[in-house]
Image (cartoon, rainbow, N blue to C red):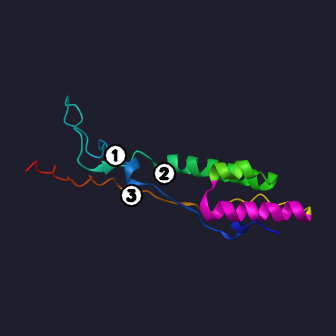
Amino acid sequence: MKHPTTRLGTAGLVVSPALLTGCTDSSTPPPDGAAPQASSGPRPVLTTDDAKQVFERYDRENAAADAALDDAAAGKVQTGALLKESLAGYEIHRKAGTEDEATHLTRPRFLIPPRKPAPRIPAPSPY
């Protein structure tokens, strides 16, 4: 029996805007002798390379948990309905005396939005 996640062909990683912040933009070089100026254009703290590393770690740890039918390891990388589904699959494999296949997600896509400034909420009036 294949693990339920083998149906997944594409994985995406969406990064919360809370993880992002504004930085400098190096697209326009500063004049000779001038220090670089901060740009108003936002640049995410989490780069695509960072996201790839996070995803690869998740994929590696999830595949190891699946191959070992390891409930505790699955609980470190999964939550909610996916974790319940995985644990149920592990239980079926244990009772049937079968092994689960280590699965890997393919063609990951990373959706990393630029940071938007938080809306300013005025302080409540004391009157």
The residue most toward the front is 127
Instruction: Tell me the mark number nearer the camera, choosing from 3 and 2.
Output: 3
Query: Element at badge 2?
Result: helix
The residue most toward the bottom is 7
Q: Earlier in the sequence, mark 1 or mark 2?
A: 1
- Magenta stretch prevailing secondary structure: helix
User: Residue 27: percent from the left, percent from the top?
Assistant: 30, 46
Quarter of the N terminus within the rendering: bottom right
Position above or below: 26 against 106? above
Q: Are marks 3 and 2 in contact (CB under 8 Å)?
A: no
Magenta residue check for 89: yes
Q: Gap in Å between the C-alphas at discs 3 and 2? A: 11 Å
User: Residue 122: percent from the left, percent from the top?
Assistant: 16, 52
Residue 71 seen in render:
yes
Label at residue 113: 3
Instruction: Answer with left or right where residue 63 lies relative to residue 58.
Output: right
Magenta residue span: 78-96
Which amino acid, by three-letter code, is at mark 3? Pro
